[in-house]
Amino acid sequence: MFERRLKLDAHVERVRDACEFSLQIADEAGFDARAAYHIEIAVDEACTNIVEHGFAGQNGGVIDILARFDGQCLTLVISDNSPPFDPTTMAAVDTSSEVYKREPGGWGIHFVRQLMDEVHYGYSDGKNHLTLVKCLPAPVEPILESGDFKISQMSASKNYRVLHLSGRLDGVSSPALLQVFHDMIHAGQVRLILDMSDVAFISSSGLKVLASGWRDSKEKDGHMALVGLNDRLADIFDIVGFNTFFDIYPDVNSVLASVE
């Protein structure tokens, strides 16, 4: 656990100093190269936005970056004395539209939202405060091993639990998954992400269990999403129409970026 601070003049040339600071902090906290890169991009975009839009090239601006690491999550509070502006109120970028039809602007905060676990804004003491949070991956905990079928879990941000499924999800293994769903949802863990990237086979029995878990979590005002479907599983989901009600994403970060 530690706390570090950097103050710099609000000039575009100094943004690289902020990036270097973020990389040093990320390395000290134990983030891998990919996560450190995400942190660097978020800091670059936030500071560049302050320089170009907050101060609009005027002199006298100061950016203050406070970094705190609690052993699990790195919190970066980026403060500046430009006029009040909340970048989190900007409309989400429509990434589904054709590039030439997209309106300019908003890409910086889009990057920040996608790459960080939490983004918050506040204004106090005459300053803007943008808070960025990035957490280390939670330790993976095995919770079930039945023959060639395994389930492990890890915590994620926004009150989600990630279940990593591995092996064959069929008539032999599906009752065990059904029990896991029952226990977790009964205990109040109703936000679930199922990582299917290592599921080699799924039968109708497995599909029924997934549908049951989805229904039970929804009845408790929860959410169940699927990630990592290979082509074979995607074909099966398409045939039975599961892609019409299941939220399916490429990876866990995409799920977390899409929800409040």
Image (cartoon, rainbow, N blue to C red):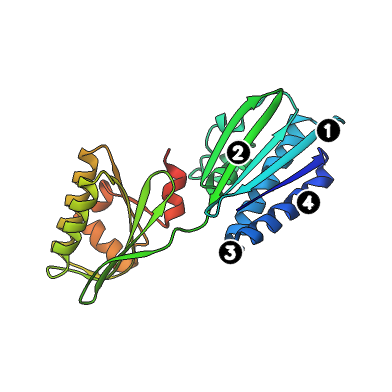
The disc labelled 3 sits on which kind of residue?
Asp
Residue 229 drawn at (x, y percent): 34, 62
| Helix, strand or loop at mark 3 | loop
N-terminal label among 3 and 2:
3
Q: Mark 1 and 4 residues: CB-CB less than 8 Å, in contact?
A: no
Circle 2: element type = strand
Q: Which residue is mark 4?
A: 16
Determine the CA span between mark 3 and mark 4: 20 Å
Most distant residue in the bottom direction: 147
Is mark 4 in CB contact (under 8 Å) with mark 2?
no
Q: CA distance from mark 1 to mark 4?
A: 17 Å
Closer to viewer: mark 1 or mark 2: 2
Between 215 and 122, the one lying in front of the other is 122
Camera-nearest label, 3 or 4:
3
Identify the mark nearer the N-term, 1 or 4: 4
Q: Is residue 54 visible?
A: yes
Report the residue at 68% width, 42% height from top: 66
Q: Nearer the viewer, mark 1 or mark 3?
A: 3
Residue 44 left/right relative to 139: right
* Disc 2 target residue: 131
Q: Residues within 10 Å of mark 1 (few under 14, many from 20)?
A: some
Query: At label 4, which amino acid type do we have?
Result: Arg
Which x, y percent locates residue 194?
32, 57
Tell me if residue 106 can be seen: no
The residue beneath circle 1 is 57
Compared across the picture, whether 227 is left or right of 243 comes to right
Going from N to C along the chain, the mark reached first, 4 or 2, is 4
Q: Which residue is mark 3?
A: 32
Q: Nearer the viewer, residue 251 or 137?
A: 137
Left or right: residue 15 compared with residue 71: right
